[in-house]
Image: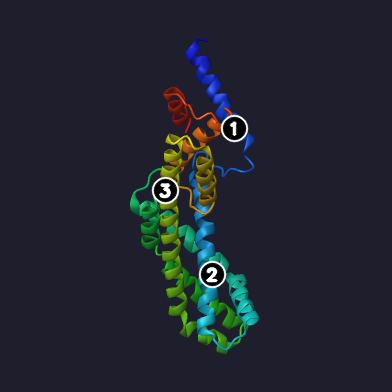
Amino acid sequence: MNIEEEKNNMYNQIINHSLIKENNQNLNINSITKENQNQFLETTLGKTINNALDIGLRLILPDIIENQIIEIKDTLLESGLKDGVQKAIDISIEFGKSALGIVTGKFDNISQIQTAVEKGGIIDNVSDSLDVVLNYTNKKGILPKNIITMIKSGKNILLDNIQNNLQKTMTNQIKGIEKIDQYIQTWNKALKEENFSKMEQSYVKLKKELENLIPLENTLKKARELENLHLLIKNKGNDLSLSEEEIGLAKKLV
């Protein structure tokens, strides 16, 4: 083994050790797969729709007390709406990817997700599912007829709330990515100023922000580069005098 290979092995070990050492604190920002991206996206959209149902039911059932609203929503979910929403999300994601011609199965940016949700017809699919569930609960006498009638009459309000919440979620994702870019810029500036304290602050904020973002390869690639460099510096005793070779290697390890 020549000197160059020994150096590469040493730096590789330092960075890998750093990632393992802080694994319990770090977001898993290893390679993005279709499966883990879908799971995160499904959870994010699921929570968005669930919150929208809460708001919408309160609007169309203003005389119903809070506990009853929760019971009504839970009844709808347990009667098939939960599975219907999940199916609507899955259809939207996969159909949207197909419509966009995404051959890797992974979204690279938020605009692709926005387009996929629109092209995938998530609102229409949720609407169809709600119709089926309301008819089922009516037929089985699971909910009072007057409640079912009010929900059917206010269905557009529910769907508008879902649409608005989905748009807010996407807007928040865009803002989160913008914050990530800002933290990376701040970190790089602090590195030039040799201010490790500011670097650490930016690094912690970046990790925290990543927890709320749908995993996107383009975003996480930049985050991985910063993390490798930051952990390399920490494991060298906060020595900021990185060589071009060390910087280049840390980026190659992304």
Give percent across and percent down for residue 175. Answer: 42, 56
Residue located 39% across and 56% down the image: 96
Question: Do tag 2 and tag 1 residues touch (Cβ < 8 Å)?
Answer: no
Task: Tell me the number on the disc at residue 211.
Answer: none
Precedes in sequence: disc 3 or disc 1: 1
Crowd around label 3: few <14 · some 14–19 · many ≥20 (10 Å): some
Q: Amino acid at mark 3?
A: Gln
Question: Do tag 3 and tag 2 residues touch (Cβ < 8 Å)?
Answer: no
Give percent across and percent down for residue 12. Answer: 54, 25
Residue located 48% across and 46% down the image: 34
Q: Is residue 107 above or below residue 251?
A: below
Q: Amino acid at mark 1?
A: Ser
Residue located 62% across and 71% down the image: 78
Tell me the mark number nearer the camera, choosing from 2 and 1: 1
Q: Which residue is mark 1?
A: 18
Q: Which residue is mark 3?
A: 182
Q: Which residue is mark 2?
A: 51
